Amino acid sequence: MRQLLLGACAALTLACAGRTPPPATTPGTRTAGDTGQRSVATTLSAPNANPFPSTYVPFPSRPTVIRNATIMTAAGPTIRNGSILLRDGKIVEVGATVNAPADAVVIDGSGKYVTPGLIDTHSHIGAGGAPGGQGVLLNDVNEATSPVTAHVWIEHSIWPQDPQLPRVLEGGVTTIQVLPGSANLIGGRSAVIKLVPSRTVQGMKFPGAKYGLKMACGENPKRVYASRGPSTRMGNVAGYRAAWIGAERYRRTWDNWLAKRTGDAPNRDLGNETLAEVLRGNILVHNHCYRADEMAQMIDIAKEFGYSIRSFHHGVEAYKIADILAREGIAASLWADWGLFKVEAMDAVKANIALVDRAGARAIVHSDDASGSQRLNQEAAKAMAAGNQAGIPVTEDQAIKWVTINAAWALGLEDRVGSLEQGKNADVVLWSGNPFSVYSRPEKVWIDGAMLFDRLDPNQQWRTDFELGYVPRRELR
């Protein structure tokens, strides 16, 4: 009976929340299907055939105009007393004035701010679901069974009913990258998802987003594998290189067979399949690494095997190699003020992000934390203040890029989200005030032009199935 009740609520998530279910696109009625639209396989599986494709369908939207607002575009100077038009899921116009269609919803943004939807490049929510704690088996972030687990995909751990997902949306975040943890040298594939209600993770996956590969340096893999190796940093590096040597061989074998297609195809290997796609440039490397010297070594390893690192994550010593990051075109996804919590984080400085930005590298504020992700704007504000206090002038127009367009670039999505420009996806946040103020909150959040959160209307707030049933609403906050 409980399963039936839960299933019924899953099919009526928005209805249970009091929201009128939009036709054909509510989580329970997606026409695109909750799994890929394929017939039962009658042929052999193939490498890189996208067996778990996105089934995301934008929610219904109405033409919307926000007027008289302060608009931080992340593409140019802030527009004071400006307007923005959203229609058919896209940003149609943004400027001092816009041509409002007769059927548009018009919102007065006086005293309020508009920004692109924020993007968190480093999250574990969904895979590390809530509630947590002893005896709760919702933490599926680390496949800590081998130093190299390139064969695992984090999307197979993501629980779409994790109540942390709508909390992060309420913080103005519209896109997140969910990464495997840092227990392993190579942890597996990431997934880029939109923060929308769905019965399946496929219904949340950002269409066309590239996978990422999580790699980790330093103390974490050393600690986890201390008894069976690698147990030193030199052991870590040997482990990376051995894995890439295997991937080179695998890629060469498959490329030769694909060119000739004679005889039986080589055996598939899920781990090498992922690594070979990195070597082909189809998967982006996201590398957990704290120390400057280790980041430099990881860059050398990447050059040895001919792949690129898209972004270093955590990088508390990124400021020491900011010029190298700029030269190599590598982004830095960083905390605003985390440091000192372990030896490799001892040399953290709060001006880290500002120093990286000043050097010309792409600076990003990430969370790696379910609570921090709900306040990514405040994290950026702290980093901006730290830069200014260190004598590095940082403007709000710079700082907004740290949580929008720079993050979009790290995910390979800068042509679709991350800034308020004509033709881009209408992922937009209306803030009650300056987003860098601790007193400001997202008032409304749109994804692809559909309003998915309205702080002023409880009926326009996503509740997961976990929060329905026997859980009183008053106990959810």
Image (cartoon, rainbow, N blue to C red):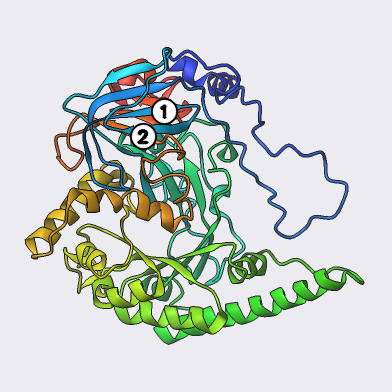
Please name the amino acid that badge 1 sits on: Leu
Residue at the location (23% across, 62% down)?
353
Q: Nearer the viewer, residue 295 or 13?
A: 295
C-beta proximity under 8 Å, tags 2 and 1: yes
Please name the amino acid that badge 2 sits on: Val
Q: Nearer the viewer, residue 433 or 464?
A: 433
Q: Residues within 10 Å of mark 1 (few under 14, many from 20)?
A: many
Q: Position of residue 313 (x, y in %)?
A: 36, 64
Q: Residues within 10 Å of mark 2 (few under 14, many from 20)?
A: many
In the rendered image, the vertical position of residue 133 relative to residue 259, given as above or below: above
In this picture, residue 297 sits left or right of residue 402: right
Name the front one of labels 2 and 1.
1
Q: Which residue is mark 1?
A: 86
Q: Secondary structure at mark 2?
A: strand
Q: Which residue is mark 2?
A: 428
Number of marks present in the image shown: 2
In this picture, residue 65 sits left or right of residue 208: left
Q: Secondary structure at mark 1?
A: strand
